[in-house]
Image (cartoon, rainbow, N blue to C red):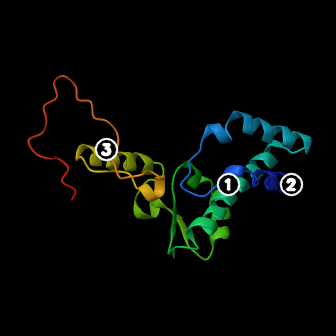
Amino acid sequence: VHAPLLQWLLQHPYLQRTPPKSTGREEFGRAYIQEIWERGAAAHLSPADLVATVTAFTAETIIQSYRRFLLPHHSLSEILLCGGGSKNQTLYRHIAAGLAPIPVTTTAAYQIDPEALEAIIFALLACETLAGRPGNVPTATGAKQRVVLGKIVPGRSHAPPARNPFPLR
């Protein structure tokens, strides 16, 4: 891990914003990767050193977010990782060390494939939409109110069900 590059990465303005927030390629896309690559080349870093530094950056952003936004307000008994990154043992170890003594594991410990969690959540949101129930959490998203998410566009041969097929409540 190249400490000067890691420190530069951790100064990104997005990381200082308070939740709710969301980002993607507009902040951390091709131009950002190009700048990381150029800074790494200027520092004579190998590709492996760049990967190690960016992995440490990813872990540190997660650790800092927990410390800044969650741990001061909530007592956590366990942290569950999911997604493809949960298979990266270096990332996993860094997060676990940075958040100790809180145990860190993956959703696999609860028989939920870490790579399937997003699909499961979208299925639950679709179920809520079909049942006509709000699926958002304004305190998490910054929305002004709870609303039914998405749109249902039935096909020509669609017949509405006789009763709600998803009686979750």
Percent across and percent down for residue 101 are: 61, 77
Of the two numbered discs 1 and 3 in the rendering, the one whose residue sits closer to the viewer: 1
* Label 2 SS: helix
Q: Residue at x 33, y 50 (%)?
A: 124
Where on the picture, by quarter, is residue 65? bottom right
Q: Residue 82, position in %: x, y?
A: 51, 55
Whole-percent x, y for residue 95 in the image: 64, 63
Outermost residue to the top: 156
Please identify the quarter of the rendering in which residue 111 is found. Answer: bottom left
Q: Which residue is mark 3?
A: 126
Q: Position of 67 compared to 113: left or right?
A: right
Q: Disc 1 designates what residue?
A: 15
Q: CA distance from mark 1 to mark 2?
A: 17 Å
Please, what secondary structure does the residue beneath circle 1 have? Answer: helix
Relative height, residue 149 to residue 7 (above, below): above
CA gap between label 1 and label 3 equals 31 Å
Q: Secondary structure at mark 3?
A: helix
Residue 164 position within the rendered picture, expressed as x and y whole percent measured from the top left: 15, 47
Q: Quadrant of the N terminus?
A: bottom right
Sequence-first tag of 1 and 3: 1
Judging by the rendered image, the residue that carries numbered circle 2 is 4
Mark 2 Cα within 10 Å, few/some/many (few <14, many 20+)? Answer: few
What quarter of the picture does the C terminus occupy? bottom left
Q: Mark 1 belongs to which amino acid? A: Leu
Circle 3 crowding by C-alpha within 10 Å: few under 14, some 14–19, many from 20: some
Classify residue 40 as left or right of residue 101.
right
Separation of disc 3 and disc 2 at Cα?
A: 45 Å
Q: Residue at x 88, y 39 (%)?
A: 41
